C-alpha cells in the first residue's frame, strides 16, 4: 500500500467531521456568537416557558393550564406566511 493512502483516509475523516459540524450549524441556525432567540427574557434557571400550539381549543387549554397551576398565560397570534 502506498504511503499516501492512510494520510488520505485520515484527511477524509477529518474533513467529513468538520463539514458535518458546519452543516449541523447551518441547518439548525446555531451560529457562534448569535444572539439567542428567547421568546421571553424572564426565563431563567428557576422559571420556564412552554409554547403550546392552539388548534381551535383556546378556552379549554387556558382552563386546563390555570387548573394545573400556571403562573401566567399569554396567547399570541402568529401569522403563517407561505411564499411560493
Image (cartoon, grey):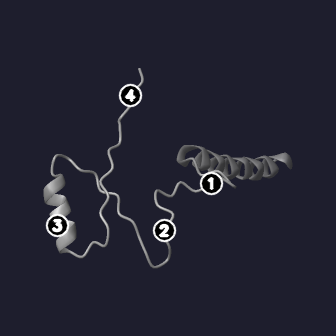
Where disc 1 sits, the SS reads loop
Give the residue displayed 70% in from the left and 51% down from the top: 18
Which residue is at the front of the view, 28 or 4? Answer: 28
User: Badge 2: few (under 14), some or many (20 or more) residues near its Cα, within 10 Å?
Assistant: few
How many angstroms separate mark 3 from mark 1 (CA)? 34 Å
Which residue is at the front of the view, 64 or 84? Answer: 64
Residue that numbered label 2 is attached to:
42
Residue that numbered label 4 is attached to:
82
Which residue is at the front of the view, 25 or 80? Answer: 80
Q: Which is nearer the N-term, disc 4 or disc 2? A: 2
Give the residue displayed 78% in from the left and 46% down from the top: 8
Q: Which is nearer the N-term, disc 3 or disc 2? A: 2
Q: Are marks 1 and 2 in contact (CB under 8 Å)?
A: no
Q: Which mark is residue 35?
A: 1
x and y percent of residue 7 in the render? 81, 51
Q: Which is nearer the N-term, disc 4 or disc 1? A: 1
Where disc 4 sits, the SS reads loop
Which residue is at the front of the view, 68 or 84? Answer: 68
Amino acid at each position: 500500500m502506498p504511503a499516501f493512502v492512510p494520510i488520505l483516509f485520515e484527511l477524509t475523516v477529518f474533513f467529513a467531521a468538520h463539514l458535518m459540524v458546519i452543516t449541523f450549524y447551518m441547518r439548525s441556525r446555531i451560529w457562534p456568537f448569535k444572539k439567542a432567540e428567547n421568546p421571553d427574557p424572564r426565563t431563567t434557571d428557576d422559571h420556564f416557558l412552554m409554547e403550546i400550539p392552539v388548534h381551535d381549543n383556546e378556552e379549554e387549554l387556558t382552563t386546563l393550564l390555570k387548573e394545573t397551576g400556571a403562573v401566567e398565560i399569554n396567547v399570541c397570534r402568529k401569522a403563517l406566511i407561505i411564499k411560493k
